[in-house]
Amino acid sequence: MSPLQNAVRTAEGVVLNGFVLSPCVEQCNGCDRVREFESEQFCSSYPDPASKWAGGRCNFATHVKVQTSAAAKVNPLKASKRAAKGR
């Protein structure tokens, strides 16, 4: 079952469960949450994708990988105690 199966085109736009959906923006290309309805693409998780990308990265984006720091800081005293215990 497609999440946009119950969507209806009205004068306001595409409406799903009382929410007016805005079309996906360019940054949404490649996301697993993008669904097509009447040859337009919409987000299945959020009605206004442009506002999610306004602050940087969309937290629903499945195609964008989060960059983590290269190495976590390790307390040398705790590391030596763990090594002594054999962990």
Image (cartoon, rainbow, N blue to C red):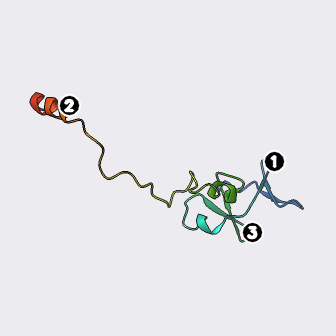
Residue count near mark 1 (Cα–Cα under 10 Å), binned few <14, some 14–19, many ≥20: few
Residues 26 and 44: in front is 26
Q: Which mark is residue 18?
A: 1
Q: Which picture quadrant has residue 48?
A: bottom right
Q: Residue under circle 3? A: 38
The Cα atoms of the two marked residues, 3 and 2, are separated by: 59 Å
Q: Residue at x 29, y 49 (%)?
A: 71
The Cα atoms of the two marked residues, 1 and 3, are separated by: 18 Å
Q: Is residue 60 above or below residue 87?
A: below
Q: Residue at x 25, y 39 (%)?
A: 74
Q: Residue at x 68, y 60 (%)?
A: 50
Q: Position of residue 61 (x, y in %)?
A: 55, 56
Q: Which mark is residue 26?
A: none
The amino acid type found where label 2 is placed reads Lys
Label 2 residue SS: helix
Q: Which picture quadrant has residue 10?
A: bottom right
Residue count near mark 3 (Cα–Cα under 10 Å), binned few <14, some 14–19, many ≥20: few
Q: Position of residue 59 (x, y in %)?
A: 56, 51
The amino acid type found where label 1 is placed reads Gly
Residue count near mark 2 (Cα–Cα under 10 Å), binned few <14, some 14–19, many ≥20: few
The amino acid type found where label 3 is placed reads Glu
Mark 1 or 2: in front is: 2
Q: Is residue 37 left or right of residue 84?
A: right
Mark 1 vs 3, N-terminal side: 1
Q: Which mark is residue 78?
A: 2
